[in-house]
Image: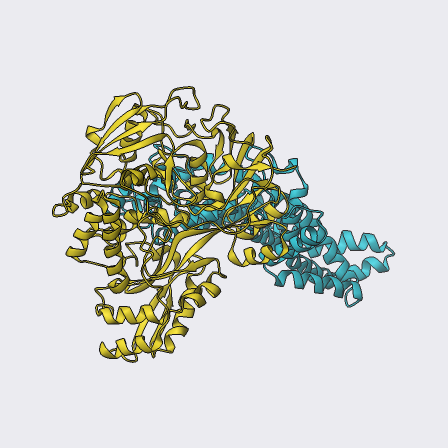
Chain colours: A yellow, B cyan
Amino acid sequence: MSDPHNPRPETGIELFDHRISRGTLLRGAAGTMLGMSPLLAAACGGGSSSSTAGTGASTSAGTPVKGGTLRAGFVGGGTAETLNLYQGVTPIDESRAQNLFDPLLVVNPDLTTGPGLALEFNANADATEYEIKLRPGVEFHNGKTFGAEDVIYSMRLMAKSANFASVPFVAGINLKDLKAINATTVKVPLLYPDADLGANFVYWNTWMVQNGETDFTKPVGTGPFMFDTFKAGTQSTFKRNPNYWQTGKPYVDELLIQSIDDNNARLEALQSGQIDAMAQLPTADAKAHQATGDITVLVAKSPQAMMFYMDTTQAPFTDVRVRQAMKLIADRPALVASAINGFGSIGNDIVGKGLPFYDNSLPQRVQDIAQAKSLLKQAGQENLTVTLQTSPIFPGFVEAATLLAQQAKAAGVTINLKQVPPSSYYNPSALYLKMAFAETQWPPPSIKFFYLQALSSKAPYNETHWKNAAWNDLLFKAIGETDQATAQQTWNQVQEIQYNQGGYINWTNADWVDGLSTKVKGLEPHPAGVLGNYLFMNAWLSA
Amino acid sequence: MTTVAEPRAADREVSPVLAFVGRRLLGAAVSLLVASVLIFIGTSVLPGNAASVVLGRGATPAAVQKLEKQMHLNKPLTTQYTNWLGGFVHGDLGDSSIGLAQGQKHAPVWALISDPVKNSLILALITALFMIPLSLGLGAIAAVYAGRPADHAISIMSLAAIALPEFVIGSLLVGVFFVWLDVLPPVAIIPPGQSPLSDPTKLILPVATLLLASLAAGIRMVRAGMVETLQAEYVMAARLNGLSERWVLWRYAMRNALAPSVQVLAQNLQWLIGGIIITETVFAYPGLGSLLVTAVGNRDLGVVQSVAMLIAVVYVMLNLVADLIVLLLVPKLREPA
C-alpha cells in the first residue's frame, strides 16, 4: 500500500520528461489501449473495468480455413517507415510490429488485459517492486527460447534513445536494478509506486525483442508472423510462424502490408481485389458502403478522444465560469453526427471512455445555452469574442470547429475560426502549446498515460496549461493506490475536477473505421486499434 | 582593323552551331545553379524538420537540438548548401534526413529513389511515346480539316480534357473502366523489385490520364502551325506543281509547322513531370511522385532536395534537346548570323 502523503510525484514526473513525444501517438491516430491486468485486479479484490464493446459488422462466421495471403493496405509513411518497434509512430509501423512481436500482456476486446508473454505481474505491498512471471516454452523465430534476459534487455533498450517512442513507458522503472530471478522470472524495481505497471506493457512500442538485438532490418520476434521482406513506403511481407505459442494460429500462410497513401486509391485497391483489408476508411465512404454491402465495414468503439481545449492561463479562459460556459455551448450529438458522420460516441469532457478507472458516474454533459449565458454574465463576458485555431490535420477537426462556431452564436459568443497548416499545429516551435483555444486528439493507451502526459505538474503536453498542486498529489495517489476500490474513488476525484474545472471539451470518442473484403473472416472490431487491433493471426480467407 | 576582323569572320564560319550550343549549355548551367539555390531555400523555410518528425509533434527542444546536431542541421545554411551541391555535382545525392534522424549512419538517397525513378521514367516514356505522335497526328488532322466537324471534335475534346485536373480525369477513368465496365484495375500497385511492364494493364489508366491532361496543348500548337503553313505560298506552289497532297502535307507543311511545336512538346514533357506526381498518387503507383509527396510531409529534405534537383536537370535537358532539334529543323539557324 502506498503512503498517500508521500506519492513521490516529482521523481516520476521528471523521468517522464524524456518521454515519448505525444505526437507519435497522435500522428498514427491509432493508439493501442491498455487496461489493468485482470490478474492484478483479481488480487486487489475484483476488477472494475468498464467495457466498450465493438460494434459493426462481424466476420466470425464459419470454421477457419488455412492458407492464402492476407494483403492489408495502410496509409504509408514513406521513407520514415521503420521495423524498429520502439521507434515506430504510424499505424503501418504498428501493423508490422504487432505481427512480428508479442506483448507481455495482451489487451482484451473489453480493454482489460490478459496474459501474453507474461503470465503474472505481482506487486509488493506498496507497489514499488514487481515480479513478472513469464510464459515458459516460447520460441523466437530463430529458435532461441524467450526468457528473463530478453525482458531485461528489451526494457533497457526502450529507454536507450531519446527518439524512441517507448521511453515514457519505462520512465518509472529503476532499469539499472532489473534482475533475472530465474529463466522465467524478472524483478522490476520502480522509482515511484505504480499499482498498475502491467498497463505499461500492452502498447506496441513496448513489446519484447531478443537479448542483444541491435539490427531491426531483419527483425526476430516471437510473434505470429516471421519477417520476409521490407521496402519502406512500398510493401513488406511476412511468413506464418509455424511454432507460434498460440497453437493453430495464424491461419494465413503469408501477410502482406501495402503502403497506399491516398484514401481513394486504398479503397479502390480493396474494391478491385488488389488488397483484402484497408485501414482508416473515411467515414463518408464507410456510410456509403454500409448501405451497398460490397465490402465489410469494420467499426470499433474506441477511447480515441477528439476535443477542443482552452488554455487555462490565457484570458478569457482563466475564469473557470468561461470554461464551463464553453462546455455547455457544445451540442455534442450534432458534432458527432455531422463532423464524423456519426462514427463515434458522445464525449463527456474526460478522456478514456472504456478504459479501466474511467469515471462512468459523471452525468453526461448536454448543451445548456441559458446556463452558459448566465455563467458568461457572471464572469462579465457577455458578447464574448474568441478565436479558435483549427487545422485539417485530423478528419473532422475543421468541420467540428465550424459547427461549434455556429452553436456558440445562440449564447452570444462569437467564435472566429483561424485555419492553420497541419505542419505547425502540433509543432512546439510553431503553434503547439501556445494556442489559447484549439483542437486535439488523444488515443490514450491508459488513463494513467493521458494524465501524466497532458495534465500532471510537469506534463510535457499540457495543452490546457493546467497547474494544480493538490490535484497533482491526488493523481499520484491514484496511480500508486493498490486497493482497487480506493483507486477507483481517487481516480474519480481526479476526473471530476477535470470535468468541472478543466480546459477540455471532449465531444466524441471516435470509432476506428476500416474496410474488409467480404472474403476476410475472423477479424473482430477491437477498441484498441484499427483492423481488429491488427490481430491478423485471427484472420482467414473464405473461398 | 582588318587584322581583327578576319579571325572573327573565321570564327563565325567554323562554329555558329557550336556557339549556339555553347550559349545554351552555359544557360542551362546557370539555370540549374539558380534552381539549386531556390530548391535549397524553398525546402529550408518549410516549418519543422526530419528531427521533429521522427521525434513526433511534441519533441522537447533539447531532444530536437541533439538530433539536429547529429544531422548537421545546426551548421550554417551556406555550409549545408555547398556540401549538398558539391555532393550532387559528384553524383552523390546525399543521405535521407529521416534515415539519419532514425539513427542510421548512412542512408543514401539513391538507394531509396532508384526504383521509383525507374518506375516514373517508364510511365513518362510510355506516355511520351503516345503523346508525340498523337499530338502531331491529331493536330495535323485538325489543321487539314480546319473549321470542319473533325477539327471541332478534336478541339472541343482536347480543350475539355485540359480543363480538368489529373485527379478528376483519373477518377473519371476509374469510374468508367473499373466501377462501370470493370475491365481495368483502378490502382497500379506494383510489388517492389517487379517491373511495371510485367502487368501492362495496370499502366493503362495512369498513362491515359496523363495523355488526356497533356495532349491538348500540343495538338493546338501543331494545328496552328499547320494551318499557317498550309496557306503559305511555297505550299501553294508545291500543290500547283502537281505534288501529291500527302507529300505536300508531310514534306512541306509538317516540317515547318514542327519547329514551334517542338518547343511546345518539350514544355508538355516538362509539364508531364508535374502531372506524374499527382497521377501517381491517384493510382498509388510506386514512383517518384508518391515518394516526393511523403518526403515533403516527412520533411525528408535530403530526398526532397535531390529529387527536385533531378527534376530540374530533366527540365533543363529537355529544353536543351528541344533547342537542338529546332536547330536541325530550321536551316536558317545554322547559318552564320
The number of callouts visible is 0
Q: Quadrant of residue A510?
A: bottom left
Rendered residue at 41%/24% (across/down): A140
Q: Quadrant of residue B234?
A: bottom right
Rendered residue at 65%/44% (across/down): B203
Q: Nearer the viewer, residue B307 or A196?
A: A196
Q: Is residue B226 visible?
A: yes
Q: Residue lying farthest left?
A: A5
The percent position of residue B197, horizontal first and vertical second, equals 64, 37
> Horizontally, is A320 left or right of A203 in the view?
left
> Horizontally, is B15 left or right of B237 in the view?
left
The percent position of residue B332, horizontal first and vertical second, equals 64, 53
Q: Quadrant of residue A189?
A: top left
The percent position of residue A416, horizontal first and vertical second, equals 36, 72
The percent position of residue A348, horizontal first and vertical second, equals 35, 61
Q: Nearer the viewer, residue A313 or A421?
A: A313
Q: Residue lying farthest front?
A: A45
